[in-house]
Image: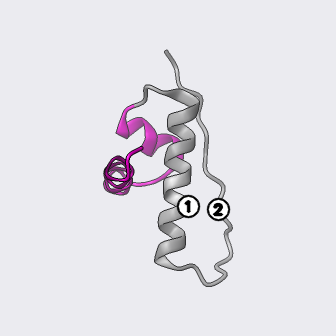
Amino acid sequence: MSVPIVKASLPTKSVGSSPRLLRQLNAAAVLRVIRDGAPVTRPEIARHTGLSKPTVKFVVEALLADGY
């Protein structure tokens, strides 16, 4: 089964980004890909979101720890 590519669109101009905001945006992008194309692998999530593989690993582990 092919998963549609969904690129996260983030603002190109920084408006005082914080690490917490970036974590929230990354989590939202990962969840969006999972909801749209489950089941999906972590490398596929990285490819569809444009996030690095280590970032996807961190986000997925945090989501699982939070009960998602």
Which numbered disc, 1 or 2, marks the residue that appears first in the sequence? 2
Residue 47 position, x and y percent, is 46, 42
Task: From this view, report whether residue 48 is shown above or below residue 58.
Answer: above
- Badge 1 vs badge 2, beta-carbon distance below 8 Å: yes
- Find the magenta span and give its range: 41-68
Q: Position of residue 12 (x, y in %)?
A: 67, 69
Residue 67 counted in the magenta span? yes
Residue 39 lies in quadrant:
top left
Look at 31% across and 52% down and name the residue there.
65
Q: Amino acid at mark 1?
A: Leu
Q: Is residue 66 magenta?
A: yes
C-alpha span from label 1 to label 2:
8 Å
Residue 12 marker: none
Question: According to the image, what is the colour scheme of the structure?
Answer: one colour
The answer to whether residue 13 is above or below residue 2 is below
Q: Which residue is mark 2?
A: 10
**Total numbered circles:** 2
Percent across and percent down for residue 67 are: 38, 46
Q: Main secondary structure of the magenta part?
A: helix
Query: Furthest-top residue in view?
Result: 1
Q: Residues within 10 Å of mark 1 (few under 14, many from 20)?
A: some
Assign a secondary structure to mark 2: loop
**Residue at the (49%, 47%) spot, across then down:** 30
Q: Which one is closest to the eye, mark 1 or mark 2?
A: 1
Q: Residue at x 34, y 46 (%)?
A: 64
Q: The C terminus is located in which quarter?
A: top left
**Spot occupied by residue 5 in the image (x, y as percentages of width and height):** 58, 34
Circle 2 crowding by C-alpha within 10 Å: few under 14, some 14–19, many from 20 = few
Task: Identify residue type, mark 2.
Answer: Leu
Q: Residue at x 36, y 39 (%)?
A: 42
Residue 25 marker: 1
